[in-house]
Amino acid sequence: MVILLDAMGGDNAPNATIKGAVMASKEVKADICLIGDEKIINSKIKEFYGKDNISEVANNLKIKHASEQIEMEDTPTIAIKHKKDSSMVVGFKMLKEGEGDVFISAGNSGALLTGATLLVGRIRGIDRPAIAAMLPADGIKGLLLMDAGANTNCKPINLLQFAQMSSIYIHNTFGIERPRIGLLNIGTEETKGNDLCKESYLLLKEKASEYNINFVGNVEPKDSFLGEVDVLVTDGFTGNVLLKSVEGIGKFVKKTLTDSLTGNIFKTICAVPSLPAINDFKKKADHRIYGGAPFLGVKKPVLKAHGSSDELVFYYTLKQAEGFVKGQSVEKMTQEFEKINNKE
């Protein structure tokens, strides 16, 4: 197996991508190919590890040279079409041509979606691929948010397909027999919400049995993290707002807790007996341990890491990527939608 990593994508690249790859190389069995400017990557390898060649750091690490990179402010379609030697476009071409099994990037989200759709292609029967982000929540597995930012404007059919894709993904990844799918809304009543929510509710309710979706109804944000649902379905605009709100609240809680425990020597001493519980809480609430977010709906495995990802996120995302390929979620999703297409 070969994991393709966009070494130049993200706010902290290439430092974070390189360090994350080195951390993961000790635990994953797959080869990790860093795609980007070879001169820059090698200079960082020398700086961080004192080695002239990346293979001296780990024998399952290698570099694929790409002379360009897509910036966060680039227009997605233009960037994909004109920056043909960018680390992202090179990665997608390698994925499509079978030179890699999964592609990871923390770069421009719009460009990643455009590249995945145009260069790799959508699974037949899926109108719009979407970002499936795992969030901290009560229970062992967490909460899958679908869509977390790929499609800002959606139709009810899109949310129905998001529910189908996420149900297949959660089942194959975590072994949950019938994942509970909730529709994000401002109330639990069937009549609540805007037109998209009300129409999506009716469509999900109608098609749930036919498409093997365990639809549990509307779910309010305040109830989403209590372990009562496995997947929260919404449009990409609302999902991205929720995603960033959760990240912001997490940072606020962490800062407030740290300030409270280190305000003075007396508070610090009193906190010592509670450190195991505090550390357990911090680990559970840390979104970084969930790694990247899969782009569900494209023909090959693609993972999106947050633009501000550090080396720990890339470490977890690389481990996640290996599991994503082994779980064959894309192949199984393709098979399921093929069955649906044949019925229609």
Image (cartoon, helix red, strand yellow):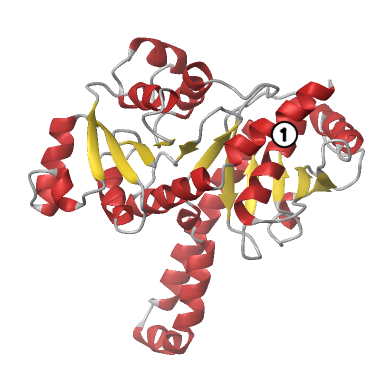
Q: In this view, does 165 lie above or below 82?
A: below
* Quadrant of res 210: top right
Q: What element carries label 1?
A: helix
Q: Nearer the viewer, residue 298 or 335?
A: 335
Q: Residue 107's spot in the image, x, y percent?
A: 39, 32
The residue at which mark 1 appears reads as 336
Identify the amino acid type marked 1: Glu
At horizontal 9% and vertical 46% (from top left) the residue drawn is 46
How many tags in the picture?
1
Q: In this view, does 258 lie to the left or right of 293?
A: left
Locate the C terminus and report the quarter of the image it occupies: top right
Q: Nearer the viewer, residue 272 or 59?
A: 59
Q: In this view, does 283 lie above or below 207?
A: below
* Quadrant of res 177: bottom right
Q: Is residue 182 left or right of residue 290?
A: right
Locate the N terminus and report the quarter of the image it occupies: top left
Q: Is residue 49 left or right of residue 220?
A: left
Q: Residue 233's spot in the image, x, y percent?
A: 72, 40
At horizontal 55% and vertical 27% (from top left) the residue drawn is 299
* Quadrant of res 122: top right
The answer, for residue 303, to whether it is visible in the render is yes
Q: Residue 94's spot in the image, x, y percent?
A: 37, 26
Q: In this view, does 74 lie above or below 143?
A: above
At horizontal 49% and vertical 24% (from top left) the residue drawn is 116
Q: How crowded is mark 1: few (under 14 residues within 10 Å), some or many (20 or more)?
A: some
The answer, for residue 148, to whether it is visible in the render is no
Q: Residue 221's spot in the image, x, y percent?
A: 72, 50
At horizontal 72% and vertical 29% (from top left) the residue drawn is 337
